[in-house]
Image (cartoon, grey):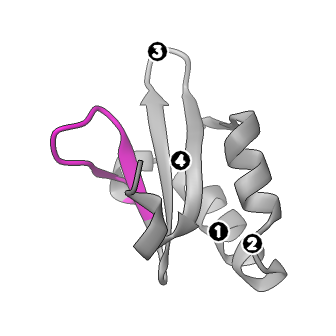
Amino acid sequence: MYDIQFTKSAQREFDNLPLDIQERISAALDRSRIRPHSYFERLVGDKSYKLRVGNYRVIADIFHDKLLILIIKTGHRKNIYKN
């Protein structure tokens, strides 16, 4: 089973989301801990992955050797892909 860790900036973004969205994202992350590739999709032209939760996205790196999902960004889909 994979562990889930947030970067500091991703944790701040997650904490600023509405409580119901936080709960939905947490539930989706818990489901993805066993087989992350069933839930995460590779980003085009990037080594990161995305998890869709309604209109919100979670951008993460998956480390198979450490069994770790590192959350890089969380937010609404209209803002998440902008630099």
Q: Are marks 2 and 1 in contact (CB under 8 Å)?
A: yes
Q: Are marks 4 and 1 in contact (CB under 8 Å)?
A: no
Estimate the x, y position of residue 31 in percent, counting from the top left. 58, 61
Residue at x-position 47% and y-position 50%: 59
What mark, if any, has residue 17 been given in the picture? 2
Q: Which residue matches tag 4?
A: 34
Residue at x-position 29% and y-position 32%: 47
18 relative position to 50: left or right? right
Residue at x-position 44% and y-position 47%: 36
Q: Residues within 10 Å of mark 1 (few under 14, many from 20)?
A: many
Q: Which residue matches tag 3?
A: 65
Q: Amino acid at mark 1?
A: Ile
Q: Does residue 33 belong to the magenta stretch?
A: no
Q: CA distance from mark 1 to mark 3?
A: 24 Å
Q: Does residue 40 belong to the magenta stretch?
A: yes
Q: Where does the N terminus fall, quadrant-wise?
A: top right
Residue at x-position 45% and y-position 34%: 61
Q: CA distance from mark 3 to mark 2?
A: 31 Å
Q: Which residue matches tag 1?
A: 25
Q: CA distance from mark 2 to mark 1?
A: 10 Å
Q: N-terminal of the two: label 2 or label 4?
A: 2
Q: Amino acid at mark 2?
A: Leu
Q: Nearer the viewer, mark 4 or mark 1?
A: 1
Q: N-terminal of the two: label 2 or label 1?
A: 2
Q: Residue furthest left?
A: 45
Q: Which element is circle 2 on?
A: loop
Highlighted magenta segment, given as a residue range:
39-51
Q: CA distance from mark 2 to mark 4?
A: 25 Å
